């Protein structure tokens, strides 16, 4: 009777074939599978009946080689998966940091743009304010903008505003409408002709007339404060007609905005 392949060799071949058909095993255990293939081929060789011990040894070795190939392949596959997951985590972290950096850059760019726009707007506002002050012919002081209304605004001894003399008052109305957060002090002053009581009352009445003019044109009364100082605060000597004329005035103080 001619020798045949030992019993059990088909099972070993089947296990090896299963591994060889697995792409992951072929990738990660190529050398081990090659060695296992050689061992299985050796185990498949026919032997005489009196060589049963050798056949059993060859089958055992072939089976061990197949299992070693399986174990090596699975271990390397797990290591490859671990490295891949690590790389994916690193890539995700890098992408997150990149997004954060991009967001920070975009935020900084927006902040710079906003600051530039605010600076430009502030410059325009400052330029417009200077233009308005020039039109108003007011003087910038520590108290605020001071608009001086001369005595031509009123008839001699009267607190009534004369018609045709209120051009500066109209400019004042326009300014106060444009800057509604500004508070206003209206202060009346006179020369020293006449009694202190008379001049005190006249200066107050003239300041009240200016306030009334402003409120009638829509300026809120709560923004306006009135004082009459008579001849207490001259700006020129009362010894001359020119000096007395300078002292007869109403000063409108537009307070600085805090």
Image (cartoon, grey):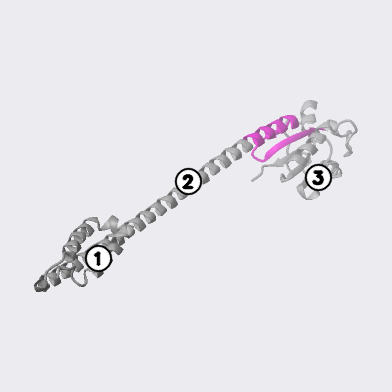
Q: Residues within 10 Å of mark 1 (few under 14, many from 20)?
A: many
- Answer whether residue 248 is visible to the viewer in this image: no
Q: Which residue is drawn at 78% across and 26% down?
A: 242
Real-space Cα separation, disc 1 to disc 2, in angstroms: 58 Å
* Up-down relation of residue 26 to residue 44 (above or below): above
Query: Would residue 127 be counted in the magenta stretch?
Result: yes
> Quick one: label 1 or label 2, which is nearer the N terminus?
1
Real-space Cα separation, disc 1 to disc 3, in angstroms: 104 Å
- Give the structural element (helix, strand or loop) at label 2: helix
* Up-down relation of residue 35 to residue 219 (above or below): below
Report x, y in % for residue 172.
78, 37
> Quick one: label 3 or label 2, which is nearer the N terminus?
2
Label at residue 219: 3
> Quick one: label 1 or label 3, which is nearer the N terminus?
1
- Give the structural element (helix, strand or loop) at label 1: helix
- Give the structural element (helix, strand or loop) at label 3: loop
Q: Are marks 1 and 3 in contact (CB under 8 Å)?
A: no
**Mark 1 or mark 3, which is nearer to you?**
1
Q: What residue is disc 1 on?
A: 13
Report x, y in % for residue 117.
60, 38
Q: What residue is disc 2 on?
A: 102
Q: Residue at x 75, y 40 (%)?
A: 178
The segment highlighted magenta reads: 123-150
Q: Which residue is drawn at 76% across and 37% down?
A: 175
Quadrant for residue 219, please give it: top right
Q: Nearer the viewer, residue 222 or 4?
A: 4
């Amino acid at each position: 009777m001619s020798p045949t392949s030992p019993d059990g060799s088909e099972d070993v071949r089947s296990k090896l074939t299963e591994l060889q058909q697995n792409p992951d095993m072929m990738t990660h255990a190529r050398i081990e599978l090659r060695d296992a293939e050689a061992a299985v081929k050796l185990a498949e060789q026919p032997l005489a009946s009196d060589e049963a011990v050798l056949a059993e040894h060859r089958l055992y070795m072939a089976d061990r080689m197949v299992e070693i190939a399986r174990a090596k392949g699975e271990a390397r596959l797990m290591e490859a998966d671990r490295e891949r997951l690590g790389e994916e985590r690193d890539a995700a972290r890098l992408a997150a940091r990149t997004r954060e950096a991009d967001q920070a850059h975009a935020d900084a760019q927006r902040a710079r743009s906003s600051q530039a726009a605010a600076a430009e707007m502030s410059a325009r506002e400052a330029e417009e304010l200077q233009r308005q002050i020039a039109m108003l012919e007011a003087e910038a002081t520590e108290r605020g903008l001071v608009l001086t209304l001369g005595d031509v605004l009123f008839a001699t001894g009267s607190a009534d505003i004369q018609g045709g003399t209120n051009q500066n008052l109209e400019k004042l109305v326009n300014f106060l409408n444009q800057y509604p957060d500004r508070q206003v002090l209206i202060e009346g002053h006179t020369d020293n002709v006449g009694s202190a009581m008379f001049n005190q009352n006249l200066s107050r009445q003239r300041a009240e007339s200016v306030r009334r003019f402003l409120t009638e044109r829509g300026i809120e009364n709560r923004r306006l404060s009135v004082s009459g100082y008579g001849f207490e605060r001259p700006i020129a000597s009362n010894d001359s007609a020119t000096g007395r004329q300078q002292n007869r005035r109403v000063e409108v103080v537009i307070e600085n905005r805090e």
